[in-house]
Image (cartoon, helix red, strand yellow):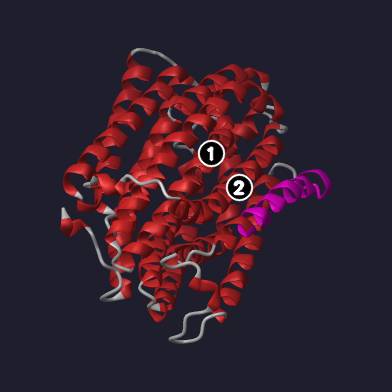
Amino acid sequence: MKSNITDMTLGSPAKHIVRFALPTLIGNIFQQVYNLADSVIVGRFIGSQAFAAVGATSSITFLFFALCNGIGTGGGIVASQYYGAHDDDRVKNCIVNTGLIMLITPFIFGLTGFLLAPTLLKVLQTPALILNDAVLYTRYMCIGLLFVSLYNYLSSMLKALGDSKTPLYFLIISTVINIVLDILFVCVFSYGIRGAALATVISQFLSVLLCAVHACRTNPYFRFHRKDFVITLQMTYRIVRLGIPMSIQFALIAVSTMALQRVVNSFGTTAVAAFTSTSRIEQLIHQPYMTLAASLSTFSGQNFGARKYDRVYTGYKTALLIMTALTVVLMLIMQLFSNAITSLFVSDSDVILLGAKGLKITSLFYFALGMIYVVRGVLTGMGDAFFSLFNGIVEVIGRFTIPLLLTSYLSFGEAGIWWSTGIVWLISGLTAWIRYVFYRSSYSPGALPKAAKTQIGG
């Protein structure tokens, strides 16, 4: 449907950013609601050990997803810039070239993760009580890597064209299917952790299948002709040039999360369960910031492609104001209701108290987290490949050093897990802002900087 495609180079920047962000936010919240429901079902109906096992796999599965997702995100940015430049042929060719890459990379990384799952979990010092369940769950997630990667590729391409509604529809469908299958496999058939994993894989497969069919039938940019199926080095280079730094950035963040998970595992099952609960909640907290960044990225990409740089900076300032308001609300919620929120997952009082303490600590750093996403959104849309890599390096250094410093040398104990998370956000947010200031200074009003001439239309 042509009406789902939005040209963000015209009209109010604030309206475009908010209207685009809302469907994405609703979709991401639905996805996180599933994650929360999945955690509640696993924690309440299988047990705290199974809950901890699922949590212990998150950093590994995120690593392999991150390696694939960067390419799809990079391709989406390239498509948004071509769309802003009104080059329809290159938009289609970008979709085709990115799709081919996204068929190959998830297969390679999924197979690697499937084979190395036991080794990686042992390296992370996963407690022996939950190791077998963790290996099983990781392997199922590696099987589903192809489906979730293809869905996110389709979502990136549709959002690049200003369509954030279509991905929402199929994300909601996938979430509902996932929850129903979770209840069926875990609560009715008593399949245990295998049932939770199987429900996720099935719903991922259905979501990508339905989304692909719908896009091809209704979106004119997904109606391909023979001339569109041309694999060119030039297009592949543009996609990879943006995608690989993003993949490396996401992978570095995943590796840094694995380093933190190793520290968490050293404190035992209670700490693992508490960290798992706070991680699930923080995934929900990330959603408004992520959707704001995604909206800003599409807005910046289209206007950068159209060479309307003043609109890019207006979008940045608008997103910064929205982020600040969100931060105040989220911080208050975590400070006032952290115990009640944590108790949704488990009934163990020790886990609840520790998890609530962790939420109160990390909520103090939400503004820094929001700054990371806002800057990432605007710079990604402008094609700044360097920032993605640089930001990932900063985070991985922080994740490897600060948790050990706080928990082992400064006697923060278990609380050091969450203090280190917040401090890493603070450092990353500060470096993101500095990068934005330097990148912004290379632009003069109405002029195209030399650094940008190679990023558009080439």
Disc 2 crowd, CA 10 A, few/some/many (<14, 14-19, 20+): many
Q: Is residue 155 left or right of residue 431?
A: left
Q: What element carries label 1?
A: helix
In this orientation, which residue lies closer to the viewer: 442 or 38? 442
Q: Is residue 347 visible?
A: no
Disc 1 crowd, CA 10 A, few/some/many (<14, 14-19, 20+): many
Q: In this view, does 319 lie to the left or right of 163?
A: right
Residue under the point 56% across and 80% down:
442
Residue under the point 53% across and 38% down:
62
Q: List x then y, in percent, for residue 377.
A: 46, 63
The residue identified by callout 1 is 62
Report the magenta stretch's main SS: helix
Type of the residue with mark 2: Ile
Q: List x then y, in percent, for residue 432.
A: 59, 66
Type of the residue with mark 1: Phe
Q: List x then y, in percent, for residue 300.
A: 40, 68
Q: List x then y, in percent, for residue 254.
A: 60, 43
Q: What element carries label 2?
A: helix
The residue identified by callout 2 is 253
Residue 133 colored in magenta in the image: no
Q: Can residue 452 be seen in this view?
A: yes
- Asked whether the beta carbons under mark 2 and mark 1 sit within 8 Å of each other, the answer is yes
In this orientation, which residue lies closer to the viewer: 141 or 267? 141
Sequence-earlier tag: 2 or 1:
1
Q: In this view, does 308 lie to the left or right of 65?
A: left
Per the rendered image, the range of residues in magenta is 390-412
Cα separation between marks 2 and 1: 9 Å
